[in-house]
Image: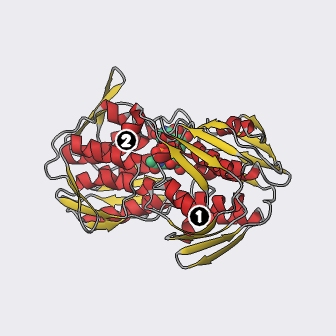
């Protein structure tokens, strides 16, 4: 398996362009199933998760090609509704295929999705919402078959504003008979992007970005051309890269309002942030101040930025507290950071971090995508050399990460080795 070799201690300088958002493109790729014909998606990032989603769509019968405008996805010949288990396990986002396949074929067969190992991640809210629209699910040997003759609109209340459940129910409801009202939905920017895409396909959806979404079912959807929004987590990760190395960076192609909570926390930690149109500049303080961070559904502080902030706070002045409220098992990166000399104590869903002046390079293992990103950030700021193993996790969600970091002055390289996980297309 490939690993990163990082020599720390260089302040990053320069400009970096943010790629299309992983968490926006994955449900949108699934939603192309709804608009029979060829949709063209612009700013599709080349990520491991995107490659897996393309592979699943092709397995189901879709035709995918690179066009001069973007990624062409033609789902007119799609003819299967069983998601291959070996692909289902590779990422969380395979679960997004449920809604579109049920809407198009009235049937879906799937097993438990994979994704970051950060908690139990049940799909009960997805199933509850789809059942309300008339789907019947049967379980056999850990796999589910959902069937429905005609989806029918309903009023649904989500017990928690789950991003994935909101998206799945929205997609299924586009072709349901009548109106669907979904209360207590997730308000993340990726939900708004999905609504915009679906409405361009011809759907009738209102309310994304608020607590309630109304979907009025239509008879048919048609393919379109669509540009994916920039990745707010990638943008946040680069801002932390600037802050943790004491550098000065300009992040280009961002929607600043999507990263408001991140910018507020970086400012509170003493770093200078400047926003201009679609650009955000960070001029790092010599050392971060201690701050407290609590993850919350959007517009609160994103859980997908929590590990990166733990690395930053491991080098801050004084004591900081991180409280993780979204996933029950997302503080494991603390023990890898401890190997670098970071002082972190974890109690249930809280990490108490006593900032050190220095941390040292070490041999580290990425346990999941953002934990891996956090270790890479810490390595960029550490004294000496670090080796980060299992970087296939990081490659699930960051496009051309090492090239982008090297351009900013970082001293790192990837050591390739042949392993099953490196051969994923
Ligand atoms: C591909 C994608 O977009 N992934 C994002 C999505 O994941 P995902 O869609 O999986 O996240 P959810 O918002 O659904 O999960 C949040 C919480 O709700 C719980 N839950 C969720 C569904 C359900 O049926 N039952 C249930 O109990 C989960 O276990 C978790 O504790 O939103 C998360 C929260 O912002 C992000 O960290 C992920 O990067
Ligand atoms: C948790 C994440 O992804 P996924 O939901 O795809 O596992 C993430 O992007 O940090």
The alpha-carbon separation of the residues under discs 1 and 2 comes to 36 Å
Residue 156 lies, in percent from the top left, at: 42, 48
Q: Regarding mark 2 in the picture, which secondary structure is present there?
A: helix
- Within 8 Å: ligand 2 and the Cβ of disc 1? no
Residue 408, label in figure: 1
Residue 133 appears in the rendering: no
Query: Residue extending furthest top?
Result: 141
Image position of 338 (left or right of 122): right
Would you place residue 219 above or below residue 304 in this image? below
Which of 340 and 301 lies nearest the eye of the viewer? 340
Q: Nearer the viewer, residue 84 or 376?
A: 376
Residue pictured at 76% horizontal, 62% vertical: 269
Residue 167 visible in the shown view: yes
Residue at the outermost left position: 77
Q: Which quadrant, please, contains the C terminus? A: top left
Q: Nearer the viewer, mark 1 or mark 2?
A: 1
Q: Is mark 2 within 8 Å of ligand 1?
A: yes
Q: Can you identify the residue that label 2 sits on? A: 95
Percent x, y of residue 94 = 36, 42
Q: Which mark is first along the chain, 2 or 1? A: 2
Locate residue 140: give its quadrant: top left
In which quadrant of the rendered view does residue 206 lie?
A: bottom left
Residue most extreme to the bottom: 276
Where is residue 242 shown, x and y percent of the image? 66, 63
Tell me residue 277's x, y (percent): 54, 79
> Which residue is at a point 34% across and 56% down the rendered structure image?
28
Q: How crowded is the residue under tag 1: few (<14 C-alpha within 10 Å), some, or many (20+)?
A: many
With respect to residue 145, does 240 lie above or below?
below
Q: Of residues 352 and 317, which is closer to you in this image?
A: 317
Which residue occupies 36% across, 66% down? 196
């Amino acid at each position: 398996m490939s690993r990163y070799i990082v020599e720390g201690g260089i302040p990053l300088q320069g400009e970096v362009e943010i790629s299309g958002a992983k968490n926006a493109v994955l449900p949108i790729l699934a939603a192309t199933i709804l608009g029979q014909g060829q949709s063209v998606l612009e700013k599709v990032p080349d990520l491991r998760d995107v490659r897996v989603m393309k592979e699943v769509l092709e397995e189901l019968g879709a035709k995918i090609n690179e066009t001069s405008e973007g990624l062409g996805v033609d789902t007119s010949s799609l003819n299967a509704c069983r998601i291959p288990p070996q692909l289902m396990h590779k990422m969380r986002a395979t679960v997004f295929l449920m809604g579109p396949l049920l809407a198009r074929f009235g049937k879906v067969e799937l097993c438990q999705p994979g994704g970051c190992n950060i908690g139990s991640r049940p799909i009960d809210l997805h199933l509850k919402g789809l059942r309300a629209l008339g789907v019947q699910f049967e379980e056999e040997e850990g796999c589910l078959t959902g069937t429905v003759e005609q989806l029918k609109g309903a009023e649904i209340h989500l017990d928690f504003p789950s991003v994935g459940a909101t998206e799945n129910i929205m997609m299924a409801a586009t072709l349901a008979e009548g109106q669907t009202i979904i209360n207590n939905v997730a308000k993340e920017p990726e939900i708004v992007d999905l609504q915009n895409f679906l409405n361009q396909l011809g759907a009738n959806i209102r309310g994304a970005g608020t607590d309630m979404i109304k979907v009025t079912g239509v008879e048919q959807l048609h393919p379109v051309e669509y540009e994916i929004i920039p990745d707010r987590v990638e943008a946040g990760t680069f801002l932390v890269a600037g802050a943790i190395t004491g550098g000065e960076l300009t992040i280009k192609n961002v929607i600043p309002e999507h990263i408001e909570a991140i910018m507020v926390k970086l400012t509170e930690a003493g770093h200078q942030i400047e926003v201009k149109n679609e650009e955000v500049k960070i001029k790092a303080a010599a050392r971060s101040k201690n701050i407290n961070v609590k993850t919350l559904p959007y517009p609160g502080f994103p859980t997908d930025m929590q590990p990166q902030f733990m690395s930053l706070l491991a080098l801050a002045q004084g004591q900081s507290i991180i409280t993780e409220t979204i996933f029950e098992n997302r503080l494991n990166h603390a023990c890898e950071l401890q190997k670098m000399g970071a002082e972190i104590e974890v109690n249930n869903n809280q990490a108490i971090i006593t900032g050190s002046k220095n941390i040292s390079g070490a041999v580290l293992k990425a346990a999941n995508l953002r934990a891996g990103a956090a270790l890479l950030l810490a390595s960029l700021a550490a004294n000496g050399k670090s080796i980060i193993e299992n970087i296939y996790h990081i490659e699930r969600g960051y496009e051309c990460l090492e090239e982008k970091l090297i351009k900013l002055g970082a001293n790192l390289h990837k050591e390739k080795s042949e392993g099953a996980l490196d051969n994923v297309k």
